[in-house]
Amino acid sequence: MSVVRFSDVCAQGAAKAKRVFIRADLNAPLADGRVSDDTRIRASVPAVKMALDAGAAVMITSHLGRPKEGEFSEADSLAPVAQRLGELLGREAPLVRDWIDGVQVAPGQVVVLENCRFLKGEKKNDEQLARKMAALCDIYVGDAFGTAHRAHASTEGVARFAPMACAGPLLAAEIEALERALEQPKRPLLAIVGGSKVSTKLTVLRSLAEKVDQLIVGGGIANTFMLAAGLPVGKSLCEPDLVAEARAVMDMMAARGAQVPIPEDVVVAAGMDAPGAVKKAADVAAADMIFDIGPRTAEKLAALVQAAGTVVWNGPLGVFERDAFASGTRAIAQAVAGSSAFSIAGGGDTLAALARFGVTDKVSYITTGGGAFLEVLEGKKLPAIAVLEERAAG
């Protein structure tokens, strides 16, 4: 992907005394009116510091929550985010509530523009709104990978009309990591796709089946693939109506000399709170519910991870939140952590699993976008990145 990088703009001195509009992803969770997890805010700090160090007048905005468009909501205000951003920057980062018709900010200063989803037309990518945003700045910086799959006024529209449009350091890093994993991977390329339903990730599975050398499926998705392979799944979460789709994915992989490993053993229980028992996959009883892969399967899948050159991971392999059903996901997480492969992981459950098993810092790249990451895996063009490519091409 060829985009103009904000780091290059700053290095050339082209941001000095310019008005810079940064669209970040500051959609942080709040508790009692304060930020409870500042991960996304921290990820956005480098772009702000880069702009300030370059002598720019800096405006930064984001969405937060799901407010009713066109209406202010105290619960969805960026006020707590602005406070935390100021603390991380070590300077004031005042919140500007009414900003669309003009903002007062001087070079060397930063202001936080109130929740962009309070503006009517934001989600519909209203052209007039996008043009108003563009008129506020000399340079637009897209730095919100988490919303790059949304063609909104603040993510796609403004980039069309701003005098200059470029990718911030976080977005540029995401682009590089995804290209390395999917477009120029070191082989074998292994994808791990977990989750509850095949239906939610069917297009992802189809797309990956055309690219990867190994495709590991987990969670409820694996149950549907087991059913497709002729194995019993008892009362487990699965989608019998998608068995043909699962077989089609397996056939696509087989035609390329690749495979979708089917669990040989599983951990079953009568319910989520019941004790688990390991069974051969062929021995699952009618009353059993599968909540994890078994130790033999985990060992074989971990070996595939160890042999991979590139690993892409989205979705756990079992109900890892419960100790009785955490072993499979733990084994894969530890295998990824101990592998020399380039690894990229994304999605809330996947990141929660990595954190639980203490291996987050052992993964090569943690993507900040859940939905955006999935759409890239599907082979889709992300609107917020596509527009930056168009602008770079002139």
Image: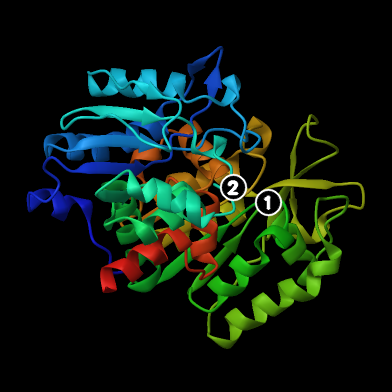
Residue 200 appears left or right of 177: right
Q: Residues within 10 Å of mark 2 (few under 14, many from 20)?
A: many
Q: Amino acid at mark 2?
A: Pro
60 shown above or below 216: above
Residue 107 appears left or right of 139: left
**How far apart are the two marked residues, 1 and 2, measured between alpha carbons?**
7 Å
Residue 59 is drawn in which quadrant?
top left
Question: What residue is at 42 percent from the left and 24 percent from the top?
Answer: 81
273 shown above or below 313: above
Label 2 element class: loop
Label 1 element class: loop
Closer to the camera, 119 or 66? Answer: 119
Residue 197 appears left or right of 349: right
Q: Residue furthest top?
A: 32
User: Any mark on residue 316, and which?
Assistant: 2
Q: Amino acid at mark 1?
A: Gly
Residue behind mark 1: 219
